[in-house]
Image: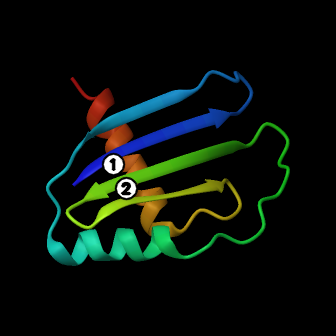
């Protein structure tokens, strides 16, 4: 599964973009797609908060949604942290 994550906002205001591919089990992939397909609760204007544009490309097409710090599903938050950790490790 391919992914693209764009994180904007925060104190610095500099966007971070993560693009890559990941090998997930079919169950993990389904859980992430399901979390992404659920519409987020209303976005809040959080001072110095982050917004997250998350896209997954699978055999079934493009799946995308936008979240902020207050409405990000836990599964997606964990995936983003895993991606950030893997790209920041030596």
Badge 2 element = helix
Residue 8 location (% of width, % of height): 63, 34
Quadrant of the image occupied by residue 73: bottom right
Image quadrant containing the N terminus? bottom left
Q: Which residue is mark 1?
A: 82
| In this picture, residue 78 sits left or right of residue 1 | right
Q: Residue drawn at (58%, 47%), measured in percent from left and top? A: 52
Residue 44 location (% of width, % of height): 82, 57
Q: Residue drawn at (32%, 28%), measured in percent from left and top? A: 88
- Give the number of marks: 2
Badge 1 element = helix
Residue 7 location (% of width, % of height): 56, 37
Quadrant of the image occupied by residue 69: bottom right
Q: Residue drawn at (17%, 62%), measured in percent from left and top? A: 24
Residue 31 location (% of width, % of height): 34, 76
| In this picture, residue 42 sits left or right of residue 12 | right
Q: CA distance from mark 1 to mark 2?
A: 5 Å
Q: Which residue is mark 2?
A: 79
Q: Label 2 near label 1: C-beta < 8 Å? A: yes
Nearest the eye: 65 or 72? 65
């Amino acid at each position: 599964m391919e992914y693209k994550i764009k994180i904007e906002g925060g104190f610095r205001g500099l966007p971070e973009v993560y693009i890559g591919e990941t090998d997930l089990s079919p169950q993990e992939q389904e859980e992430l797609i399901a979390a992404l397909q659920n519409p987020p609760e209303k976005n809040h204007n959080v001072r110095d908060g982050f917004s997250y544009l998350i896209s997954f490309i699978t055999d079934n097409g493009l799946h995308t949604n936008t979240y902020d710090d207050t409405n990000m599903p836990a599964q997606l938050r964990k995936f983003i942290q895993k991606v950030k950790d893997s790209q920041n490790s030596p």
